[in-house]
Every structure is written in C-alpha cells, then in structure tokens.
Amino acid sequence: MLRKSWITAVIAIASGLACAQVPLAEAPAPVAEPEIVFVPPGDSPLPLLWQVSDADNTVYLLGSFHLLKPDDYPLSGDVNDAFADAEAVFFELPPEEMNSPQLPVQMMQAAVRTDGTTLDSQLPPETAARLRDWQAANAVALQASGLTPQRMQMFEPWFVGLMISMTEMGKQGLDPKLGLDQHFIAAAGFAGKRTGGFETAAQQIALLDGMDRDEQLQFVDEALSQAANDDLQVLHAYWRAGDADAIWNEMGVDMRDRFPKLYRHINVERNDAWLPKIEQLLAAPGTDDTLVVVGALHLLGEDGVVEKLRAKGYQVERICSMCKPVANAGGSAK
C-alpha cells in the first residue's frame, strides 16, 4: 500500500498546473513531430482509453498522465488509432492557454501574499523547519528557477506546495514537456486537427487559490512528505500498466474520503461541467470524431466521466487490445 498523497492526485488531475512547471520558467519548447507507429505488446503503456458513440459521432476518452518519461513513447496502437480517427482533439485547457508563457505569471500573481505577512508566519514551526531543510537540499534547483527561499516567503502555501511537488517530479525524471497533453498538442498541430479545451487557466488556478487555510497548510505538509517517498513513481507505473482500479483505489478513493471538499471541487464539479460539452461533441452535425485527453482520475470511479456517461444511457467501451479482461463496473478492460 503506497502512502496516500492528495497533492499527487491534484497533479494527476490538473493539466494546466502541471504544464506551468516552476516560476520564472520559459514556455515549453517546441516538441518534435510525434512518432505514430504500432508498438509490439509490452513495449508501450497500456491505455486508459474509452469510446462513446451516438448515431454518427464518436468521442474517445483518454486518461492522461501530465508528466512522462522518454521511454513512455511511442504509445500503443490503440491510442494512435483513436488519434488518427479523430478530426478534433480536446484537452482540459485549450493548447494556447496551456502553453502560454503567461500561465506561470498568472499563477504567481494569484499566489502572491498581499497582507504584508510571510509564508513562515502561516506555517506551523515543524513544517517551517522541514521546508528549510528541503530548501537547503534543493538549493541549486531553486536558484535556477528563481524561487529562492527568500522569494518563497512571498507566496501562499498552495503555490509553495505545488512548486515543491513539481521540483520533486523533475528529480524523478518526469517531465511536463513529455506529458500526454503536450504530445497530442504537437501531434494535432502537425496533423492539422482542430483543438479545444473544456475550461480556462483562470479556473484551474482558482481551484488551488480557493483552498482554505487548513487545506493549504496540508498541501505544503503533503508535498514535503511526498519528497521522501515514491508515490508518483508508483502512480506512473499504474498508468503504464493501464490499471484503472489501482489508480482509483489508491489515489481517488483516498482523496474522496479524506478531503471530500477538495475532491468535490477538483474532480466532481469539473466532471459535471464537462459532461454537457462531451454530449455536444457527440450531438454535433456531421461525422467528426473527437479525442478527449484529460487527467486519468477524471475518467475513473463512480464520479468519473465514464460512469456519468453510462448513467445517462450511453454505451461506453474500454479500448485496450492488449489488456487482460477483468470484470469491473468502472474502469478495467472489457
């Protein structure tokens, strides 16, 4: 049983936050044309991929991991086929917002303390001491990003927690420039496919900036704890294995049970807001199909998009030609 960490779940859900990387970082560099080839079994991740269709249109739902490694590519033939069939690709954020150099700036502006206090004045003494130890151990990375310990005192705890987590992910070899979102943004551009998004960067930033004091302090504490364990590597392994049950049971259920308010804001309310937009894609005139790429947790569990579509009467089918059939109502292969 891995140590539960809801900050990992937040990163797994929110694409714009992951792609923003660290403060003062440059916008993501252009991505080389993705390799779209069939990969022999065992050489590529098993996809968290579903399809839902009406009389004339299909929407493919692909569960994303927003930070990946070079050896996570190429993707499986199932994912490449879905992309090839789609005339449009939709993400949590429109690509122009996800890759905007203004996104890190917007995050910092939302996180700057405006009451004249410092970060340490808000942190419990033990947490402040742990943060100083972490800063000392990561001095080189923080100096390179411009987020020195002194500068960090200017920001709200949610932003500091996010930067700790993103720094640790980078140390583990996970790169937002290699995330599934960035891969398909580049692929759609090369293929001339239409793109879009379900929400705005301002909405994603507001999710974190709107956390109450206790949630923000927990955010920092969880981020510091995550630095000492391999939660994200385990979650990444589950994603590569296409193990919907493990991702949901280890991360989604824990977040729902321990932090119900945050879970509702981060996951349930956004899923509910996306449903009519997905239905609009299905109901659109013509025969255009769409690939939807969103954080994997959005698709899983009883509050996930897959089950919500089924509850509306749609037939939703898991696509994973290499998966072993497992009986499960919400996520495993069919």
Image: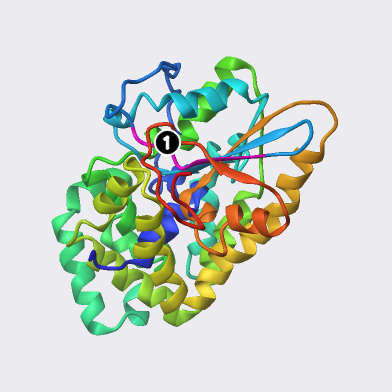
Give the residue displayed 23% in from the left and 66% down from the top: 1
> Measured along the vertical axis of the image, is residue 289 above or below residue 211?
above
> Measured along the vertical axis of the image, is residue 8 above or below residue 178?
below
Picture coordinates of residue 89 (x, y %)?
62, 31
Horizontally, residue 10 falls left or right of residue 246, namely right
Examine the image and state in which quarter residue 59 appears.
top right
Q: Amino acid at mark 1?
A: Glu
Q: Is residue 230 visible?
A: yes
Q: Nearer the viewer, residue 177 or 118?
A: 177
Q: Secondary structure at mark 1?
A: loop
Horizontally, residue 94 falls left or right of residue 179, namely right
Give the residue displayed 66% in from the left and 46% down from the top: 315
Examine the image and state in which quarter residue 278 appears.
top right
Q: Nearer the viewer, residue 218 or 44?
A: 44
Q: Is residue 161 visible?
A: no
**Magenta part of the chain:** 45-52
Q: Is residue 47 magenta?
A: yes
Q: Nearer the viewer, residue 38 or 214?
A: 38
Picture coordinates of residue 291 (x, y %)?
60, 33
Marker count (numbered): 1
Picture coordinates of residue 149 (x, y %)?
27, 61
Determine which residue is flagged by label 1: 26
User: What colour scheme has been applied to the protein in the rendered image?
Assistant: rainbow
Picture coordinates of residue 332 (x, y %)?
44, 50
User: Badge 1, how many Cα within 10 Å: few under 14, some, many 20+?
Assistant: some
Q: Is residue 123 magenta?
A: no
Give the residue displayed 53% in from the left and 57% down from the top: 109
Q: Nearer the viewer, residue 78 or 168?
A: 78
